[in-house]
């Protein structure tokens, strides 16, 4: 079954370019498009979509708020934030809003396709180290919405799970965590899965965000 993709961007030429790349793939179909957030929400009500490629800066309703509203629905499609990164401080807010990752707008086609497939399979598309660099840069600019209620959530974790969560937030891959803690990679993957379940998080990106919000890991630390 093909991955159903929606393109949300106010630049028609950019949508056309993405559509051409995706149309050449046997396992992907562009089933919907929108030029702003308001239109995107309307189109989604009548469309079955698996993955949304979401621009951040758009008229009427920006990509962050659009992502937040999409992710509040039951069984929402996965959202990839498209950003210029060096100029766009909204990428972190997009991750907090529920996006499964972010990508540069000039991403090579092969990386874009791999990211869509990865998100569709349930993984986050942002490498932990890249996520950490983003958070290190922008977290101090954003209000902390954590506090005691968020910290209480961490009490659900075992000591080992908390240790794994810290290493995830510090940018280590499962293999690197396994080497650091002298565990098998399969065991680390199991711990990460339990962390996601206990904390009611979607993916590793949200693990990193929560770690920063609660102070478990600090920007630059």
Image: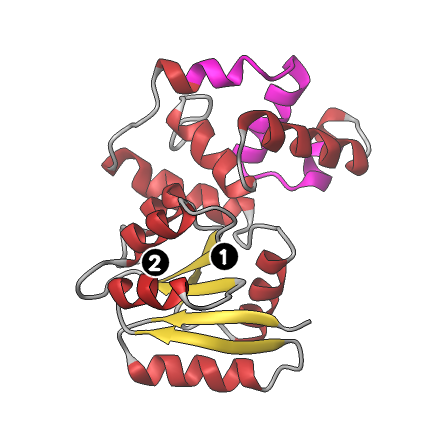
Q: Is residue 91 above or below residue 13?
A: above
Up-down: is 35 above or below 208? below
Q: Return the residue nearer the eye: 20 or 50.
A: 50
The part of the chain drawn in magenta is 151-178
| Residue 157 shown in magenta | yes
Instruction: Tell me if 139 is positioned left or right of 6 in this view.
Output: left
What percent of the width, then of the height, locates residue 1? 69, 71
Q: Quadrant of residue 60?
A: bottom left
Q: Residue at x 62, y 82 (%)?
A: 25
* 27 up-or-down from 87: above or below: below
Which image quarter is the C terminus in? top left
Q: Residues within 10 Å of mark 1 (few under 14, many from 20)?
A: many
Where does the image place residue 40, in percent across and percent down from the top left?
33, 66
Is tag 2's residue or tag 1's residue first in the polypeptide sequence?
Answer: 1
Whether pointer 2 and pointer 1 mark residues with C-beta atoms closer than 8 Å, the reply is no
Along the line of sight, the residue nearer the viewer: 42 or 219: 42
- Residue at x 56% of width, y 65% of height: 116
What residue would you read off at disc 1? 77
Left or right? Give the position of 19 relative to 183.
Answer: left
Could you tell me if residue 22 is visible in this image? yes
Q: Is residue 155 left or right of residue 83?
A: right
Q: Which mark is residue 85?
A: 2
Q: Residue 73, image x and y in percent? A: 42, 47
Can residue 221 be seen here? The reply is no
Mark nearer the viewer, 2 or 1: 1
Name which quarter of the figure residue 162 lies in: top right
Who's the residue at 54% across and 80% down the image?
22
Residues under labels 2 and 1: Cα distance? 23 Å
Q: Main secondary structure of the magenta part?
A: helix
């Amino acid at each position: 079954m093909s991955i159903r993709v929606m393109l949300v961007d106010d630049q028609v030429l950019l949508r056309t370019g993405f559509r051409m790349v995706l149309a050449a793939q046997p396992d992907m179909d562009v089933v919907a498009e929108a030029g702003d957030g308001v239109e995107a929400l309307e189109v989604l009500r009548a469309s079955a979509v698996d993955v949304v490629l979401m621009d951040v800066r758009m008229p009427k309703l920006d990509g962050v708020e659009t992502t937040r509203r999409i992710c509040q629905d039951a069984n929402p499609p996965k959202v990839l934030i498209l950003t210029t990164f060096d100029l766009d401080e909204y990428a972190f807010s997009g991750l907090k809003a529920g996006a499964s990752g972010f990508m540069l707008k000039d991403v090579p086609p092969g990386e874009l396709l791999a990211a869509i497939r990865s998100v569709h399979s349930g993984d986050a598309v942002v490498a932990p180290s890249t996520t950490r660099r983003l958070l290190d840069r922008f977290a101090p600019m954003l209000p902390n919405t954590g506090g005691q209620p968020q910290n209480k959530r961490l009490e659900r974790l075992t000591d080992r799970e908390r240790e794994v969560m810290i290493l995830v937030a510090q940018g280590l891959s499962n293999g690197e965590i396994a080497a650091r803690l002298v565990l098998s990679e399969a065991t680390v993957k199991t711990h990460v899965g339990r962390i996601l379940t206990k904390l009611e998080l979607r993916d590793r990106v949200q693990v990193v965000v929560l770690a920063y919000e609660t102070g478990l890991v600090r920007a630059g630390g």
